[in-house]
Image: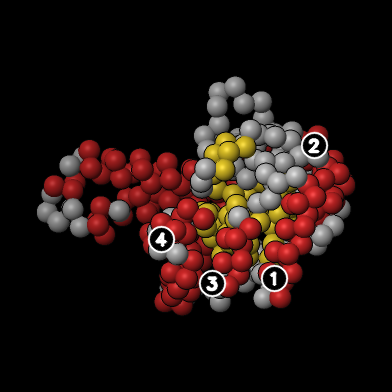
Amino acid sequence: MLVSAKEMLTKAKEGKYAVGQFNINNLEWTKAVLLTAQENNSPVILGVSEGAGKYMGGYHAVVGMVNGLMEDLKITVPVSLHLDHGSYEGAFKVIEAGFSSVMFDGSHYGIDENIEKTKEVIKAAYEKGLSVEAEVGAIGGEEDGVVGGGEVADPAECKKIADLGVTMLAAGIGNIHGVYPANWTGLRFDVLADIEKTVGTSMPLVLHGGTGIPDDMIAKAITLGVAKINVNTECQLVFAEATRKYIEDGKDKSGKGFDPRKLLAPGYEAIKAKVKEKMVLFGSVNRA
């Protein structure tokens, strides 16, 4: 059964590790992440962007697929199904469809409007037992058309949003979505430390754009209160690479190598390996 992310993130924050949010794009992706979590006895968050939700046929289809896989694969570790960078309208749609967690990204509104809309999402979500993530200071790069320039959040604004009672807070600390450019200057740990001090040490902080941040920076961010780390691009890259190699090696032309179950198998295995690597790095193995 799907659970809110609240308990797993509270435990992660106390235990100084982080739970990975791995964005899903189709059945292969979802199955790979769920089985890897089960094999490593790790809690996990399945992230779904609005674009990915639409691609998979809609939010009810996603909920049906995830619930069905969990039942048939006998998944017993805590799993949260989370809307990633949700719009105001999208947030209400997933609450109704049966997600167990929601991110309302009001970072492109002024702080006052962000606060008002966040309050409404919190009220609707908490009535149904969902966890809520809010964002302050846009995360850089592009996520489904939402572009941010790697801004740095203002700790005082973070406190205003945290005080509304959100479950977890995503704050921009120079991180970006997608592949990091060569001239990237790194995470702003001074800002992260200020944010943790300002919002209180019990608030789980979220690091978006986990792809390409060096391992030592990830480890340091976890010591400064980051309890949830989002990974998306990295899984897409290894999936594409493994699929390309299979085709370039001519394996799709041999026997029944064109069968999608065979064609997509190397990419599926590549996702599993990447997810395990991240779970080890985040420290969530055997924390279920």
x and y percentages locating residue 43 in the rendered image = 60, 63
| Circle 4: residue type | Met
Local packing at callout 2 (Cα closer than 10 Å; few below 14, some 14-19, many 20+) is some
Report crowding for label 3: few under 14, some 14 to 19, many 20 or more residues within 10 A (C-alpha).
Answer: some
Q: For mark 1, what is the residue?
A: 124
Looking at the image, is mark 1 or mark 3 earlier in the sequence?
Answer: 3
Mark toward the start of the polypeptide (2 vs 1): 1
Nearer the observer, disc 2 or disc 1? 1
Residue 56, numbered label:
4
Q: Amino acid at mark 2?
A: Val
Q: Position of residue 108 (x, y in %)?
A: 67, 44
Q: What residue does disc 3 label? A: 97
CA–CA distance between discs 2 and 3?
A: 36 Å
Q: Residue at horizontal 21%, vertical 40%?
A: 249
Does residue 195 appear left or right of residue 69 in this picture? Answer: right
Real-space Cα separation, disc 4 to disc 2, in angstroms: 37 Å
The kind of secondary structure element at disc 4 is loop
Pointer 1 local density, CA inside 10 Å: few below 14, some 14–19, many at least 20: some
Left or right of residue 145: residue 204:
right
- Residue 191 is marked as 2
In 3D space, how far apart are the residues under numbered discs 3 and 4 (Cα atoms)?
14 Å
- For marks 2 and 3, the one nearer the N-term is 3
Image point (73%, 64%), residue name: 120
